[in-house]
Image (cartoon, helix red, strand yellow):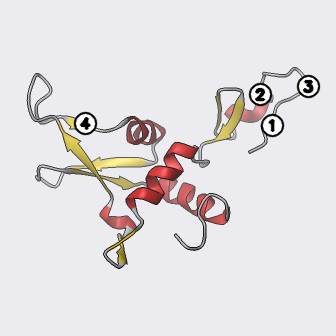
């Protein structure tokens, strides 16, 4: 993805904060743009297994702490935590051992944006 920087070099344009963009490294990234690690997580979680792909509404499994001071608390990985912080996922407790992280409206918009790029989501996947 080409970075969109103004003539100063590393400073984003004035309106970028109002358009929902942020700086990641030296790149200006839109909130609906998924990072390569986030795209890999989506491909791995929803790939075809046993002849059938998982449904998006089933969400992503998130572990809980089994012991220690955080027992019973969610234990999301770094990529899932980043998506939770950005508002792309939300945790839903179904009173099971596993939690499910489900996509919000912003998360579904990010998935649609990802599906538009043939390199991010090849047609065979």
Q: CA distance from mark 3 to mark 2?
A: 9 Å
Confirm or deny contact between disc 2 and disc 1 (CB under 8 A).
yes
Measured Cα–Cα span from mark 2 to mark 1: 7 Å
Q: In this figure, which residue is indicated by the disc labeled 3?
A: 7
Q: Is residue 109 left or right of residue 118?
A: left
Residue located farthest toward the bottom when viewing the structure as drawn = 51
Give coordinates of residue 113: x percent, y percent. Answer: 62, 59
| Label 3 – label 4 distance at C-alpha | 42 Å
Q: Residues within 10 Å of mark 4 (few under 14, many from 20)?
A: some
Query: Which element carries disc 2, helix, strand or loop?
Result: loop
Q: Which comes sooner in the sequence, label 4 or label 1?
A: 1
| Residue closer to the observer: 104 or 77 | 77
Residue in the image at 31% along x and 75% along y: 50
Residue 5, x across and y down, in percent: 82, 31
Label 2 vs label 4: CA separation? 34 Å
Q: Using the image as rendered, state which of residue 25 and residue 83 is in the foreground.
A: 25
The first of marks 3 and 4 along the sequence is 3
Quarter holding residue 7? top right
Q: Which residue is mark 4?
A: 75
Query: What is the crowding at mark 1: few (fewer than 14 residues within 10 Å), some, or many (at least 20)?
Result: some
Q: Secondary structure at mark 3?
A: loop
- Whether the residues at callouts 2 and 4 have beta carbons within 8 Å, the answer is no
The label number, if any, that marks residue 12 in the structure image: 2
Q: Residues within 10 Å of mark 2 (few under 14, many from 20)?
A: many
Please tell me the numbered disc located at residue 4.
1
Q: Nearer the viewer, mark 2 or mark 4?
A: 4
């Amino acid at each position: 993805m080409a970075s969109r920087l103004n003539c100063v070099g590393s400073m984003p344009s004035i309106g970028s904060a109002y358009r929902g963009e942020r700086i990641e490294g030296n790149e200006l990234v839109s909130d609906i743009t998924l990072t390569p690690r986030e795209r890999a997580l989506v491909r791995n979680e929803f790939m075809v297994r046993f002849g059938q792909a998982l449904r998006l509404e089933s969400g992503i499994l998130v572990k809980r702490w089994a012991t220690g001071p955080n027992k019973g608390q969610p234990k999301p990985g770094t990529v899932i935590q980043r998506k939770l912080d950005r508002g792309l996922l939300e945790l839903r407790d179904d009173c099971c051992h596993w939690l499910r992280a489900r996509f919000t409206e912003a998360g579904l918009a990010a998935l649609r944006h990802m599906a538009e790029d043939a390199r991010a989501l090849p047609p065979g996947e």
